Image (tube, rainbow, N blue to C red):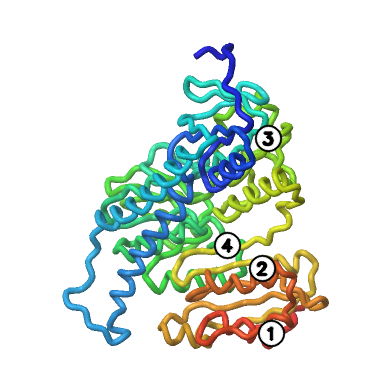
Amino acid sequence: MSLTSEPRRFDAIIVGAGQAGPPLAHRLVGAGLKVALIERKKFGGTCVNTGCMPTKALVASAHAAHVARRAADFGVRLQGGVEIDMPSVMARKDRIVSTASKSVEATLRSLDGCTVFTGAARFTGPKTLVVGDDLLSGDLIFLNVGGRAARPDMPGLSDAPVLTNTTILNLVEVPDHLVVVGGSYIGLEFAQMFRRFGARVTVIEKGSRIIGREDEEISAGIQSALEAEGIVFRTGAECIRFAPHPAGVAVGVDCQVGTPEVIGSHVLLAVGRTPNTDDLDLASAGIAVDARGYIKVNDRLETSAAEVWALGDCNGKGAFTHTAYNDFEIVAANLLDAGERRVTDRIETYALYTDPPLGRVGLTERQAIDAGHQISVGVRPMTRVGRAVEKGETRGLMKLVVDQNSGAILGAAILGVGGDEAIHAIVDMMSAGGTAHQLGQTVHIHPTVAELLPTLVSELLPVS
């Protein structure tokens, strides 16, 4: 191919088949546009291939093992104990991932009006990209290129065999001792699942506590639950370093308390994400990025280049499947339906899939105070939630944050059984502009976790 040759022309080019790209292709084709979709590797993006689907499949296997070990607590006797068949665990995960990824690809390839290209894309000009031997041009361009595990410049990292959230999915053995560097959402999920598979697990966190963006009692509640399963935490690790060791990898900690290094048979690096924008040659298209490589976008997800949009993890506006899909909805509504949807209209919500899970929406207590709100807070331990007691899963708490003056619900956290589902009652109430008074008047089904949300309103106390 010569870059001086005439490009293949399309009305729209989508780069990336993650959570935003495929539904956008369907909408654009439905509007009569000729579409090209480019995917460099696996269809379905992070969620399908290395994120939500594989990890939640593994979480499910780990939970099954955990429940089996607790069978006697429920009056159920098992003979012979619980054994983990790790190759079978991983094979189950692979089947789930493969089915989903192939389905995304097959649907796109059969979509009339959409031409699929495989390979890495790179801009050669404002509206032209090269992929493999093909030069493409498009009037509208949509970037949905996702992200990957960050590998910061840490001493010894390049010399040590360290796993990421992607490569750890290829293990077919249970580590003897898994050291997780990073006490945040990804690291904690892997820490618990591998502990339940039988590994010794140590979590190393640079900060003074795990998941530092959460309120302190939430962080403490999660750490307490994981410590009860035998996971060891080393916080305040100010000088993390790596070195090969005969037993695996030595991870320097330099904590104020404890041994100065931890030896792991395997080490998982889970210290953040970085966008897949470094090889797109965005400068050739006049597309600006920030200091971390995220594509700069406005409230409509438009980039600095005319008629170029960035969706999903690469724009820094959200790192979740649901925010990527909402990016698609925003762009499609504004472009095709004469809508006026904006990124800032959405309420932040997410979950941590440890056991118990954490469901979160809106502002934490600290964030609300820092934003200048006078607040009231309601807290209820899961030991006082009938559904949790009946299931024998009473760790955690429920928390509601309300503006004292308006009664507006500012945020909530449910750390406990079913918390990732029950939180949606608050998400919906906030989205509809409902107040704490309205939540308090709502009747929920018994016995559920969500039925105690109105009770939280009656337990609100002012925070000075």
Numbered circle sitting on residue 364: 2
Residue 145: x and y in percent read 55, 39
Which mark is in front, 1 or 2? Answer: 1
Q: In which quarter of the image is the C terminus?
A: bottom right
Spatial CA span between label 3 and label 2:
34 Å
Element type at marker 4? strand
Residue type at tag 3: Val
Q: Distance between the residues labelled 3 and 4?
A: 28 Å
Check whether the beta carbons of the residues at disc 1 and disc 4 lie within 8 A of each other: no
Query: In the image, what residue type sits under mark 1?
Result: Gly
Of pointers 4 and 2, the one earlier in the residue sequence:
4
* Mark 3 or 2: the one toward you: 3
N-term-proximal mark, 1 vs 4: 4
**Tags 3 and 4 touching, CB below 8 Å:** no
User: Could you tell me the amino acid type at mark 4?
Assistant: Tyr
**Residue 350 disc label:** 4
**First in sequence: mark 3 or mark 2?**
3
